[in-house]
Amino acid sequence: MNSAGAAEAQGAISGGQIAAAVMGNALEFYDFTTYALFAVQIGNVFFPFHDGFTKLMGSLLTFGIGFVARPIGAIVLGAVGDRMGRRPSMLLSFVLMGVGIIGLVLIPPYAAIGPAAPALLVLCRLIQGFALGGEVGPTTAFLIEAAPTRSRALIGSWQSASQAVASLVGAVIGFAMSHALTPHDLESFGWRVAFGLGAIVLPFGLILRRRLPETLHRPDTISAADVEPGAASLLRPILVGLAMIMSFTTSTYVLLYMTTYATQTLHIAIKDSFGPSVANGISGIVFALLGGWLADRYGRKPVMITARTLLLLVTWPAFALIVANRDPVTLTVATGVISACSSTSVGVALVALTESLQKNVRSTAMAVIYAVAVTVFGGLAQPLISKVIEVTHNPMAPAWYLMAAAAIGITAMSFLRETHPAKVAALTAADFA
């Protein structure tokens, strides 16, 4: 049976299996969105400095510390995925994720336990970082191995769409709480309630993941990476993947930063600052899936490169309008447009990169590539932008950062081999003709 026939014979992946696979990624971004939305309140609770900027930087740097453990988690949990199976790795990462988020909810404030409070906050962030470092590799490998060939990009794009769903839920909860609670209540317990609501999915996620089929031992139906076995075949996807993920993670965390940007730089009231996160979530869901659908029909590279080029073109005028108008409507609409251009390419890129890797190293390599790029560029994005704005007094700093990252991403994509099954088969046939 050929690879396409084998893929169809395995049957369609169910909605429950897709949900189980992407739930960890969704919880990650719910956590990150919630942290970004309440970064100011968290800074006030755990970092008792008199200067408001120093409190915010303490909070954002603690947010970034969680990224330090990502490469370690990627190596450990990614290897579990390649040796023991995708499912055991996915279960372990989800348990550790739960420990980190529940621990964060329960940490007493600095006023109660002193320096132990920020220390425990850092510990919880490190546990979460370790777990999340090993999340994307095994789950993306599972999705593309379980999916029928004809819809692999669409199903794989749920990795990106799930992030947007979580960001949207986090933004809606943050918006509702900012209107229902006073600023004092938001700081004393509101942000804890927001994190606690995310933890509700933990038992359901564990149940669903325990029921997943194992794809590690199935005959591989992905042929794009089988031409050159060995270490040499990894060099191109590793180098290209690092640059691509850097581009995507930069846009992702700049978009997550927009609520903080609205309140701290544009001085928009906090109750009016959640619109960008809502727009980011809606655009992310719609356009991530649209990108996957298009990639299944026209190929991975055309979709990725076109969408990232549009992002490069719209970023400067979008931020120019935001800075000129400084109102919630412009901020929300412009953020939605930027998110649409970015999201169209993210899910497709994760699929294409995973398809480029051999099965015996797919989980580990994907996890490490993703974790290293996100650690270096995602963890530093928000504090770096905050510092540049504070030093230069230039609110256009995020635009320059996004545009530089988009240009690097476009260049990297041009060097990635096309992995659309039909196009790979056509190239292979041409080689033998």
Image (cartoon, rainbow, N blue to C red):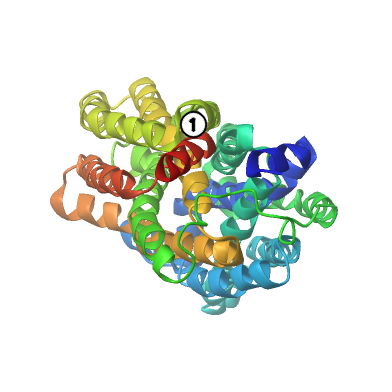
Q: Is residue 319 above or below residue 361?
A: above
Q: Residue at x 57, y 71 (%)?
A: 73
Q: Answer with left or right where residue 277 lies relative to residue 26.
A: left
Residue 24 visible to an observer of this rendering: yes
Q: Which residue is mark 1?
A: 295
Give SS at disc 1: helix
Q: In the drawing, does residue 335 fall left or right of residue 109?
A: left
> On the picture, is 296 further left or further right than 82?
left
Q: Is residue 269 visible?
A: no
Quadrant housing the N terminus: top right
Give the image location of residue 83, x and y in percent: 68, 72
Residue 174 lies, in percent from the top left, at 57, 39
**Residue 125: x percent and y percent?**
55, 67
Q: Residues within 10 Å of mark 1 (few under 14, many from 20)?
A: many
The residue lying furthest to the left in this view is 392
Amino acid type for the residue under numbered disc 1: Ala
